[in-house]
Structure formats: C-alpha cells, structure tokens
C-alpha cells in the first residue's frame, strides 16, 4: 500500500470517529439546552433548579401539577403514594388533616367515605368495617359511638332506636 492510500484510510477512520462522537453529543447537547430552558421556566414560579429535578424524579413533569401539590403543603417525595392511589392534592390534604395515611384513605374512599365524614368515624375510633355497619343502619359517627358505649351492635341499636330508645 502506498503512502497516499494509508493517509486516506487514516482520515476515513478519523471522520468515522468524529461522526460517531457527534451523533452522541448533538442530541445530548439539545436535550441539555431544552432541559435548562424548562428549569428556567419553573424557576419563574418559585422552583429552585434542584426542586424542579426532584419533582421530575418523582414523576411530576407538569408545572401545574407541581404547583397544585406544593400549594397544599406537599413536597415532591411525599406525593408518590397519593398519586398512585389517584388521590388529588386537595383531597390528599383533607385525608392528612383527618389523620389518615394513604392506605387508610384508600380504604375509606373504597367505601365512599369523604375525608370529613371519615374523620368523624376515626375520631370516635371506628374501623372502616365498623363504620360501614353503623352507617348501613343509618347512624352517624356520634350516634354510633353513644350506642356502642352502651354495648349495642348496629342491628341492636337500630331496633332500639325504632322502638323510641335513646343512646
């Protein structure tokens, strides 16, 4: 092989290596620029760059959603389970105010208890199952607690109430 042929091979290899490097670096640079622009947009709404990345790491890519969660007092790491149970920010705050964690909130929701009503049952130390039984017989949490204190079951209390009995 002559010197000219070797030179052409070397330049071809260099061109190939540069092309491969650029095929990686160009998309990487574009993504970095776009990400920095998105972070700058979030900064206008009071999110620090590290906070923005934390929200993204926790699956919140919408600034509107992040603002909704943050306005209810949540941080990015706290919302994962609430989102997994499809509980919106305002309702999640109500459940927390009712002293219910995510699992308890999901259980109460499953049986159509609103956070405020569930809070009453929780305050009187009723389990979800007991609350369902008492509610089925037409009692609210306060009434049920009074009848339960007398040692009556929901069915017994319902019969007593129909006969004019008082807790």
Image (tube, rainbow, N blue to C red):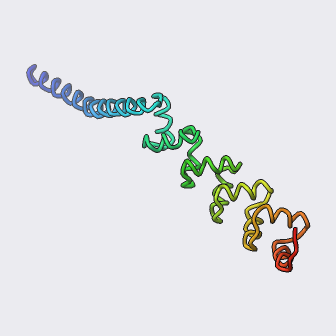
Name the image quarter holding the N terminus: top left
Q: Residue furthest top?
A: 3
Q: Residue furthest right?
A: 150
The quarter holding residue 61 reads: top left
Q: Is residue 117 left or right of residue 149?
A: left
Q: Is residue 18 left or right of residue 97?
A: left
Q: Is residue 65 left or right of residue 91?
A: left
Residue shown at the point (69%, 50%) measured from the top left: 98
- Work out whether 66 lies above or below 49: below
Q: How many marks?
A: 0
Q: Position of residue 26 (x, y in %)?
A: 26, 31
Q: Position of residue 55 (x, y in %)?
A: 49, 38
- Work out whether 25 lies above or below 158: above
Q: Position of residue 57 (x, y in %)?
A: 49, 39
Residue shown at the point (65%, 55%) measured from the top left: 115
Name the image quarter holding the C terminus: bottom right
Residue shown at the point (29%, 34%) measured from the top left: 27
Q: Is residue 155 left or right of residue 80?
A: right
Q: Residue furthest front?
A: 164
Q: For this rendering, which residue is in front, 29 or 47?
A: 47
The quarter holding residue 114 reads: bottom right
Q: Position of residue 7 (x, y in %)?
A: 13, 21
Q: For this rendering, which residue is in front, 147 or 73?
A: 147
Residue shown at the point (58%, 49%) measured from the top left: 82
């Amino acid at each position: 092989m002559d010197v000219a042929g070797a030179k052409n091979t070397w330049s071809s290899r260099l061109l190939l290596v540069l092309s491969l490097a650029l095929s990686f670096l160009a998309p990487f640079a574009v993504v970095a620029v776009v990400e920095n622009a998105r972070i700058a947009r979030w900064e206008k709404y009071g999110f620090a760059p590290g906070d923005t990345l934390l929200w993204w790491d926790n699956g919140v890519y919408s600034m509107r959603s992040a603002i909704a969660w943050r306005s209810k007092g949540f941080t990015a790491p706290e919302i994962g389970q609430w989102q997994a149970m499809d509980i919106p920010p305002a309702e999640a705050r109500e459940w927390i105010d009712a002293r219910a964690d995510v699992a308890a909130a999901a259980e109460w929701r499953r049986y159509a208890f609103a956070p405020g009503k569930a809070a009453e049952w929780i305050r009187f130390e009723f389990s979800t199952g007991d609350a369902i039984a008492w509610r089925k017989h037409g009692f609210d949490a306060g009434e049920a607690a009074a009848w339960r204190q007398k040692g009556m079951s929901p069915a017994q209390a319902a019969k007593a109430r129909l006969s004019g009995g008082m807790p």
